[in-house]
Image: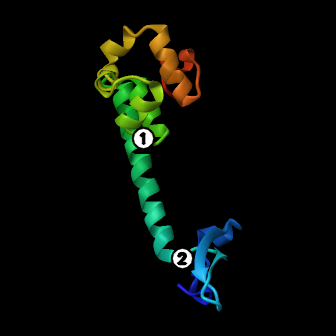
Amino acid sequence: MNKDDVPQDDSSLAKKNVHELCYAVDEHGRYTAVPSRGWEAKTLALNESLKLIDERVAATKQAVAAGELSPIAYYMEIHRMDVPLLASYAGIHRWFVKRHFRPKRFAKLKDKTLQKYADVFGITVAQLKSPID
């Protein structure tokens, strides 16, 4: 893409005075950094993906409130993680992480294990154990 072809859409990024850094070819054929105010297609795609994430978080929150899942599942969704990533950060095998999603298993976890999860999520063990608002 040439430097003059970088999208400069009056999208939600421009309204928030946010610029995205893009790389384009300048008049000498070299890559150079060019600020962009975004483009409509990208903004629509980002908004749609954020909407889907919000729906997943809401569904997980309802499942936790209904006693179908443990709070670990909720915090994992809030932090936009999946099981392999959470397992890696917490230093717990994936199979155990999945088991810890069950409320009965979660209730039996030792504070040492809960602390690993709390550290990953940046919260306290008490917050992890408390009901989700």
Q: What amino acid type should be assigned to the residue bearing mark 2?
A: Trp
Q: Hey, which quadrant is residue 65 in on the image?
A: top left
The front one of 69 and 124 is 124
Check disc 1 and report the residue beneath it.
57
The front one of 113 and 2 is 2
Q: Position of residue 116 (x, y in %)?
A: 50, 20
Q: Nearer the viewer, mark 1 or mark 2?
A: 2
Q: CB of mark 1 within 8 Å of CB of mark 2?
A: no
Give the mark, 1 or 2, whose residue is nearer the N terminus: 2
Q: Hey, which quadrant is residue 63 in on the image?
A: top left
Q: Is residue 95 left or right of residue 4?
A: left
**Residue 55 visible, this orientation:** yes
Label 1 neighbour load within 10 Å: few <14, some 14-19, many 20+? many
Q: What amino acid type should be assigned to the residue bearing mark 1?
A: Val
Residue name at image x 46 percent, y 69 percent? 44
Checking the image for residue 93, the label placed there is none
